[in-house]
Image (cartoon, coloured by chain):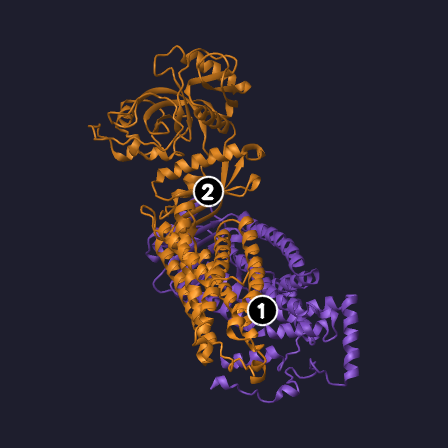
């Protein structure tokens, strides 16, 4: 713990500075590769859609000891009722889940009775879900609508509260997060249910939430930047990033802990269902979201900002001043090769104030 | 703003809100726990999409009538807290029916059955229940809900109970059928659920919609399809009050003429023509004269409301709405219980992990954060209880997940503040001024970030159905609570603590020790 705390102190004062913005090529390359894989997998394999999207029926039967025998038994029982089985799985060790083609309520009753007598349970203990094929597509249609409306509102808010380059950077990071999360779903073959879609939508909010906190610090650091010649926008943004790094780490840990707990408890107690679908999407999305708010959003912001005439002239002034002052920057050290660069004069041990004793 | 800030005032406001909510939540006669959704207590949820006959768009009147019919069927199940709600609008509207605790397969079939309207001749009328007060009049009563409870059971002809289950129908009237009629007690009959008996070719025994009267009806003379239009009007002359104007189709008018020519000559009650919707008699007007042109007026001592309701029933009969099942979810109470337990356990573990982390990292400040989280949790719980009893808000599994995710977002507000505060300390400020300056900076960030989160929740809420809504609602609510707690609890408590000797002692347990934050003596001296 104190490791992070000390790091926080040194990060804040610029004693330790990770040159994140300067190494944007690396982050862009990593993200580009992951994005390409995501898009390619999405195109080739597609998502493993749950019955909510395809339409069909799902029966969940509680059993005392789920084994491969119960899978065969379930399959036989359903097939005997003249219903085509698409998938039988054991969930949570004590339930058998059978997914079938779309059936009418009468047929589902037959299947329910058949399963009940096979496993010796009461019909009323079997969980039944019948989904028309239109239901899932409507959920996704609404989700798409929500996405568009949300993006417009957020772009407006970010442009008003911050400035348009921040809106652009924030939205790029957002698209990045959602694409990668969906890509991971395609890659891993995890089932996509409406709960997963909720998870995806929540990532939108979370990813931006994280970015807003970082950008707020960037905004503060760059307030009167162009009037001076102390540091370039890129450097100021990088400083802000370093100063909020501890917060980003802490926030991610604190946000991921509950999600992790849902995931673990869900897997152990329930096997599969709403909780896990949601938590899994969130877990992946939050990780990607934290990454992008640090490694993607801010570098893009710096890139866009540096193209403005105002910032171009600032960079020119800063470079000129540094050349005049000598090779070593006085206030700001721009690390080049190494990731962590201890700045020269402040490398000595920090003197302890008397009050600490 | 910060100049005249008084921490105690904020804390008093918070305490008053908490007490106020507590009193409200604990009002006698209401539930004192959040209402649980179906996935947490078991039951059936059916999502139905209505479609009008002939590809016409579903009008809001038709939708309202459909919901009334469904609600009547659901009420007939006798399950407390059943709900019938709509979501979406126009062509996309959905009807969501939730019946907690009931997982019979037949429920779904009953709900989706299209309600039909038939005109039938009346063979016999009697009081719905063998109670002394029930009036045998066949007046319209569209108010619904009122049931006549018999004070005592009068001797009834012995008829096997199975013979009194709907549909009670026959192709030929005989003594056995008459016996079933006299044995029927409408107040205790599943007939009132509707949707089970309206085979137009059979004689039927049924009840009036409110259960006050029972009927033997002839096979259907006309059907809803014979109706062209119906309207509630208030004629200018005559003191008759509200009436319903009925226009039949060309084909319907001819049959109607034949039927009324025959009926008006009959003796009461067989001169009545019953209007049965969904198997229940809505009205049974007496035919006073043959109606040849296909235009009839139904008069009586109707109120405006009654006339309008009857007109809507007739209009609905002309264009019945069929319901297709989008989704059926039946969850056994055992599984619901399991899900509730898992959700709560996950929440508890998540909370404990977050608390441990905050305590380890922020020490004394962490204690403030933990109490802030607990205050937020208490506020959320109370609001869920109140919303449950006030607007029937139900807590679903997705909702619980939303609340658990919110733990992280709520805690982040404190993290943002504490990190800002520590930044100020690192700059060499004293604790007292650091808490003030840190707050001024953190406040903006917290508001901006929470606004984005709230925006996501609101958009999600308005553009979604079902479980997504529950999730969005809890997420949005907890975001608002987060702001509330950060402003009215975390801030004043930290301000107060900053005045204490111990927090200024520099002990490493305070979480704000200058030494641990690496403040050098030179920067401290500069202050």
Q: Is residue B496 above or below residue B502?
A: above
Q: Is residue B347 left or right of residue B517?
A: left
Q: Secondary structure at mark 2?
A: strand
The residue depicted at 56 percent of the width and 39 percent of the height is B90
- Residue B401 point in image, percent of width and height: 46, 60
**Residue situated in front as seen by the camera: A212 or B372:** B372
Question: Which chain does the residue under circle 2 lie in?
Answer: B
**Residue situated in front as seen by the camera: B429 or B413:** B429
Using the image, tell me which numbered label, if any, was put on residue B225: none
Which residue is labeled 2 in the image? B85
Closer to the camera: disc 1 or disc 2?
A: 1
Question: Chain A drawn in what color?
Answer: purple
Tell me the crowding category of disc 2: few under 14, some 14 to 19, or many 20 or more residues within 10 angstroms, Cα based.
Answer: few
Q: Are marks 1 and 2 on the same chain?
A: no
Which quadrant would the N terminus of chain B be assigned to in this image? Answer: bottom right
Q: Is residue A49 visible?
A: no
Which residue is labeled 1 in the image? A290
């Amino acid at each position: 713990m104190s490791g992070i705390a000390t790091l926080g102190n040194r990060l804040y004062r610029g004693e330790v500075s990770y040159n994140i913005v300067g190494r944007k090529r690396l982050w862009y390359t990593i993200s580009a590769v992951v994005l390409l894989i995501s898009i390619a997998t999405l195109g080739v394999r597609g998502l493993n859609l749950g019955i909510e999207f395809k339409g069909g029926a799902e029966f969940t039967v509680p059993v005392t000891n789920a084994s491969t025998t119960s899978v065969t038994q379930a399959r036989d029982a359903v097939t005997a009722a003249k219903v085509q089985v698409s998938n039988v799985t054991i969930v949570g060790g004590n339930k058998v889940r059978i997914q079938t083609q779309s059936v009418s309520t009468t047929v589902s009753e037959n299947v329910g009775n058949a399963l009940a007598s096979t496993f010796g349970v009461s019909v009323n203990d079997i969980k039944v879900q019948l989904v028309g094929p239109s239901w899932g597509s409507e959920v996704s249609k609404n989700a798409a609508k929500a996405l568009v409306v949300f993006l417009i509102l957020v772009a407006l808010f970010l442009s008003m509260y911050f400035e348009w380059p921040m809106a652009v950077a924030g939205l790029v990071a957002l698209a990045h997060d959602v694409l990668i999360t969906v890509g991971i779903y395609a890659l891993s073959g995890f089932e996509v249910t409406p709960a997963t879609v909720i998870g995806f939508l929540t990532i939108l909010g979370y990813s931006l939430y994280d970015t807003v906190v970082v950008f707020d610090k960037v905004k503060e650091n760059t307030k009167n930047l162009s009037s001076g010649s102390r540091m370039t926008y890129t450097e100021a943004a990088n400083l802000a990033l370093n100063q909020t790094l501890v917060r980003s780490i802490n926030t991610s840990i604190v946000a991921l802990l509950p999600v992790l707990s849902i995931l673990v408890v869900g897997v152990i107690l329930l096997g599969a269902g709403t909780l896990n679908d949601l938590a899994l999407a969130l877990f992946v999305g939050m990780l990607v979201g934290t990454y992008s708010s640090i490694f993607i959003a801010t570098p893009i912001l710096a890139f866009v900002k540096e193209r403005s005439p105002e910032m171009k002239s600032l960079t020119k002034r800063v470079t000129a001043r540094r050349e005049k002052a000598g090779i070593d920057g006085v206030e700001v050290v721009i690390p080049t090769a190494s990731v962590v660069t201890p700045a020269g004069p402040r490398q000595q041990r920090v003197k302890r104030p008397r009050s600490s004793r | 703003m910060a100049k005249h800030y008084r921490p105690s005032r904020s804390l008093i406001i918070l305490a008053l809100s908490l007490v106020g909510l507590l009193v409200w939540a604990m009002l006698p006669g209401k539930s004192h726990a959040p209402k649980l959704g179906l996935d947490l207590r078991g039951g059936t949820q059916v999502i139905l999409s209505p479609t009008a006959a002939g590809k016409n768009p579903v009008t809001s009147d038709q939708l309202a009538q459909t919901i009334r019919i469904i609600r009547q069927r659901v009420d007939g199940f006798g399950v407390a807290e059943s709900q019938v709600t709509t979501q979406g609008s126009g062509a996309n509207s959905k009807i969501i029916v939730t019946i907690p605790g009931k997982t019979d397969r037949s429920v779904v079939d009953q709900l989706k059955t299209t309600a039909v309207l038939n005109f039938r001749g009346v063979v016999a009328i009697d009081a719905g229940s063998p109670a002394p007060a029930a009036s045998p009049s066949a007046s319209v009563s569209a108010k619904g809900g009122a049931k006549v409870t018999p004070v005592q059971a009068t001797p009834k002809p012995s008829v096997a109970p199975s013979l009194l289950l709907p549909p009670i129908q026959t192709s030929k009237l005989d003594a056995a059928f008459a016996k079933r009629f006299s044995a029927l007690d409408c107040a205790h009959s599943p007939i009132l659920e509707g949707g089970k008996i309206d085979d137009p070719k059979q004689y039927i025994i049924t009840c009036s919609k409110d259960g006050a009267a029972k009927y033997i009806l002839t096979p259907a003379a006309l059907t809803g399809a014979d109706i062209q239009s119906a309207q509630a009007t208030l004629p200018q002359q005559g003191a008759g009050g509200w009436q319903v104007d009925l226009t039949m189709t060309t084909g319907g008018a001819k049959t109607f003429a034949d039927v009324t020519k025959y009926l008006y000559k009959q003796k009461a009650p067989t001169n009545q023509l019953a209007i049965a919707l969904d198997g229940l008699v809505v009205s049974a007007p007496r035919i006073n004269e043959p109606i040849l042109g296909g235009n009839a007026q139904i008069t009586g001592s109707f109120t405006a409301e009654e006339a309008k309701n009857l007109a809507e029933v007739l209009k609905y009969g002309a264009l019945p709405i069929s319901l297709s099942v989008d989704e059926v979810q039946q969850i056994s109470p055992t599984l619901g219980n399991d899900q509730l337990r898992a959700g709560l356990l996950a929440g508890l573990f998540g909370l404990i992990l977050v608390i441990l982390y905050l305590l380890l990292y922020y020490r004394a400040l962490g204690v403030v954060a933990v109490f802030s989280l607990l205050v937020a949790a208490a506020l959320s719980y109370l609001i869920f209880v109140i919303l449950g009893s006030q607007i029937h808000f139900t807590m679903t599994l997705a909702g619980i997940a939303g609340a658990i995710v919110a733990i992280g977002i709520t805690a982040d507000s404190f993290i943002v503040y504490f990190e800002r505060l520590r930044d100020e300390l690192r700059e060499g400020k004293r604790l007292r001024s650091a808490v003030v300056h840190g707050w001024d900076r953190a406040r903006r960030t917290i508001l901006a970030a929470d606004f984005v989160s709230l925006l996501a929740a609101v958009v999600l809420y308005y553009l979604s159905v079902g479980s997504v809504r529950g999730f969005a609602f809890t997420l949005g609510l907890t975001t608002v609570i987060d702001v509330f707690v950060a402003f009215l609890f975390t801030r004043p408590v930290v301000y107060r603590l900053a005045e204490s000797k111990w927090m200024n002692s520099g002990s490493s347990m305070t979480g704000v020790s200058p030494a641990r934050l690496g403040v050098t003596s030179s920067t401290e001296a500069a202050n």
